[in-house]
Image (spheres, grey):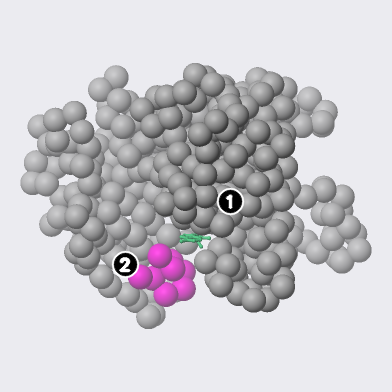
Amino acid sequence: MSKAILVLNAGSSSIKFTVFDRAGGALAVRYNGQIEGIGTRPRFKVRDGAGAVAHEDAWENPPLGRGHAHALEMLAAWLDPHLPEEGLIGVGHRVVHGGPTYSAPTVIDDGVLRDLESFVPLAPLHQPANLAGIGATLDFLPGVPNVACFDTAFHRSHPKVADIYGLPGEYYDEGVRRYGFHGLSYEYIARALPELAPELAGGKVVVAHLGNGSSMCAISAGHSVDSTMGFTALDGLPMGTRSGQIDPGVLLYLMQEKGMGAKQIEDLLYKRSGLLGISGVSNDMRNLEASDDPRAAEAIDYYVFRIVRETGALAASMGGIDGLVFTAGIGENAAGIRRRVCEGLAWLGLALDPAANAAHGPRISAPGSRLAAYVIPTDEERMIALHTLAALAG
Ligand code: ADP
């Protein structure tokens, strides 16, 4: 029997993949890579398990209108001679939306595929890319089982009060709910707590997943009870290019006074807002930190302000807080952002250890701090691989 698993994370402008070897009880990375810039100037890069570059390619003129299809063909062509001869145990797919129904990883069959297609209106920018990845795998790896792992699933443990909006009930019934996202990342962190932060594992923890997409989650005794993202991945914190929480009255104003249509508003909220929109400089935290433009400083100020504010809100949702965990690109690397967030939470009894923070943890709170703070690198691909193994064994 083969010992490898392929994990595919097909997003709106990038496709990431990892090939894991199952060695005994552990999962070791064989290859890890991505195709970025789909639809514009795709670049393909693969590293081996030791981090050495195994392959690099770029396309100046990709076939028009076939962005994802072209990228998936290039990926399949590279993977073909690089997969183990015995084949794969299975393929695990990151799927952004499991709708109200899917609360666990699921082996994909025709019925599941139809359900996932029916969730496209809930995540119009991401679900089609996920489905393209599944379709391509069914074509180029016939007979290999596929497992859908949902970004929403970990949040299905929310109490109903955390999932409803103040709208007539029929909207909830047809699916207008606060789903929450980044669930695979939060689940990975929740599972890592007993080993890395044992004093927090059974407690009340706020996890801040701070990447290009940013959200936060209230985890009580290992279960999600609330999160900052809602019906879509637009809500909550400001992000690289997404607005985060906004008064719905602003949308009415844009429609009524500016004559903006749905597509223009979608473009504004998803692609031209957040850190990029406020700063006018960049969506990338490294560029903002390096900039001396006062608008870049304002974007960072707003980002930190919202993280501090949401920590208070999530703590209230749980009726207390024992610890805070930072993860993802900004959370794992931007010591200055972490320092400012922790300073903003001094009133909760959080005292930072500056040297530990500069060294990126893992524990960054000072001895004696009432609130513990940690940096824990997330690994959504590994979480998907573990889910895939479990779903196929089950
Ligand atoms: P995605 O949501 O695309 O997976 P990541 O988790 O990779 O995003 O995070 C990307 C963000 O992390 C970018 O804003 C990037 O600037 C930021 N980042 C990465 N490394 C650093 C660093 N050393 N200092 C500050 N920000 C960083």
Whether 195 is drawn above or below 38: the answer is above
Q: Farthest bottom residue? A: 60
Whether 277 is drawn above or below 316: the answer is below
Q: CA distance from mark 1 to mark 2?
A: 35 Å
Residue range highlighted in magenta? 36-43
Q: Does the magenta segment cover residue 41? A: yes
Residue type at tag 2: Phe
Secondary structure at badge 1 equals: helix
Residue type at tag 1: Arg
Secondary structure at badge 2 equals: strand
- Residue 389 in picture, x, y percent from top left: 27, 29
Residue at 72 percent of width and 42 percent of height: 309
By secondary structure, the bulk of the magenta-drawn segment is best described as loop
Q: Does the magenta segment cover residue 324? A: no
Residue at 85 percent of width and 59 percent of height: 255
- Residue 195 in picture, x, y percent from top left: 36, 28
Q: Is residue 231 left or right of residue 120?
A: right
Q: Is residue 31 left or right of residue 163?
A: left
Residue linked to disc 2: 44
Q: 252 or 375, which is in the foreground?
A: 375
Query: Which of pointers 1 and 2 lies earlier in the amino acid sequence?
Result: 2
> Badge 2 local density, few (<14 within 10 Å), some, or many (20+)?
many
